[in-house]
Image: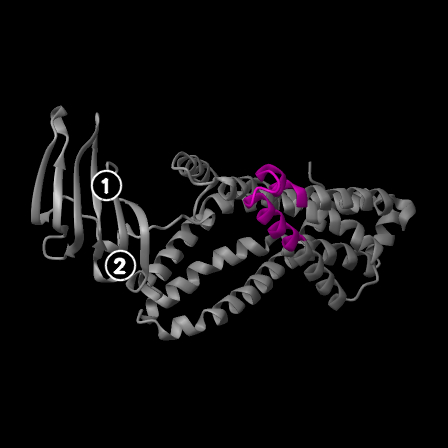
Amino acid sequence: MINTFSRYMFRRFLAPFLFGMFLFSLLIFLGDMFDKMNDLLKSSASLGVILEFLWLEVPYWTGRVIPMATLLATLTALIGFVQSGEWLGAESCGFQTRSFWIPILISSIVVSLFSFAFQETLFPLCFRQAERLWQVKIHPEWEWNQYYNIALIGAPDEFLQATVFIAGQGLMQRPLLEKMGKNGVEFQLDAEKALWDSSLQKWVFYQGVFRSFSGGRFKEEVFSKRDSDLDVPPKDLIPRTKNPDEMSLRELRRYSKRMAALGVSPLELETAADSKIAYPISNFIICALGIPIALKLRRLPKAGIFFIALAVSFLYLWLIEISKALGSSGVISPLAAAWVPNMIFGSLAAVGLSLYGEPSSL
């Protein structure tokens, strides 16, 4: 049962946590916005679309800074409690040192659960929509990009290859379209080029050969122009790999298996999937690390608290990114890549708590 003292420590944690969430996400959001400012100013998208994009980016950066806010709240709550003299007063009433920081640690567990729920619901939804606005309306690279020697998927049973694909012009050179059936390839369209016909809403093939394999019989027909059944617009054919941030853990697991079946290395996706479990738990780990730091540096001024929170958080996030890169490249396993940072900082937290988490340490 939560007593009055625990509720008081929860409140001490909550205020700086919310402040840290707002401040850190705002700073990183502004930095990202200024980095994209040139593209935003040149974009032909309406002001409403740009504002919608910027608003949808807020949850992304908020999710990224939760561990930083957790550490700031831990340091602020405990150091403020010591510097105000409340620590000595509570000890004189018989409270043990653990009673001061266990409510803070419980708060970090709640934050970890919130972070995971946020990551699985609102986070991917907003990120996916923001990416769509950026790629389609604000910075539509498909208008000028050219793709060489690519394989594309039209309908679930249509496979397409082309030596050159220019989406902005609705043009494919040396396209080969295959229609799959229960017994394999039903027919092929092999042509010199294909153009997107906006009036027909279909691709039209020119100077090619139609090959039929249905019924166990082979038939070949030369044509100068032939309308196909391929009705996927050029911009929807663009080969795009999904960003792990736009998927929930379950979606990412399924997507990783699908890419592996297509011959694409799943290491990066598997690392990202394991990180979706490890990253929310980092809130608990970084809080546990912040407790001995706060008890050791209990005379630190507010500016120093902010600096320590930034320094330790960025070191943690930097280690996470390095570990992800190692996992994606196959140097270490995806599971190890996701959990090594937590293991390192968790070990430091355990040592710190054993040294500074008892009454004799003060």
From mark 2 to mark 1, how far is it between C-alphas? 19 Å
Q: Mark 2: give few (<14), some (14-19) or many (20+) Cα within 10 Å.
A: many
Q: Nearer the viewer, residue 253 or 70?
A: 253
Dominant SS type (magenta): helix
Looking at the image, is mark 2 or mark 1 earlier in the sequence? Answer: 1
Say whether residue 6 is visible: no
* Residue 7 % position (x, y): 69, 47
The picture places residue 182, in percent across and down from the top left corner, at 21, 26
Residue farthest right in this picture:
360
Q: Secondary structure at mark 1?
A: loop
Provide the secondary structure element on which disc 2 rests: strand
Three-letter amino acid code at the position of disc 2? Ile
The percent coordinates of residue 212 (x first, y second) are 13, 34
Q: How many marks?
A: 2
Query: Magenta part of the protein: which range?
Result: 316-341
Judge the density around disc 1: few (<14), some (14-19), many (≥20) Cα neighbours within 10 Å: few
Residue 333 covered by magenta stretch: yes
272 sits left or right of 295 in the view: left
Q: Nearer the viewer, residue 41 or 269?
A: 269
Residue situated in front as seen by the camera: 44 or 228: 228
- State the quadrant of the N terminus: top right
Q: Say the numbered circle drawn on residue 319.
A: none
Disc 2, disc 1: CB below 8 Å? no
Say which amino acid is labelled 1. Answer: Ala
Left or right of 219 on screen, residue 32: right
- Identify the residue under disc 1: 155
Please tell me which residue is depicted at 41% across the width and 39% down the height of the picture. Answer: 259
Residue designated by label 2: 166
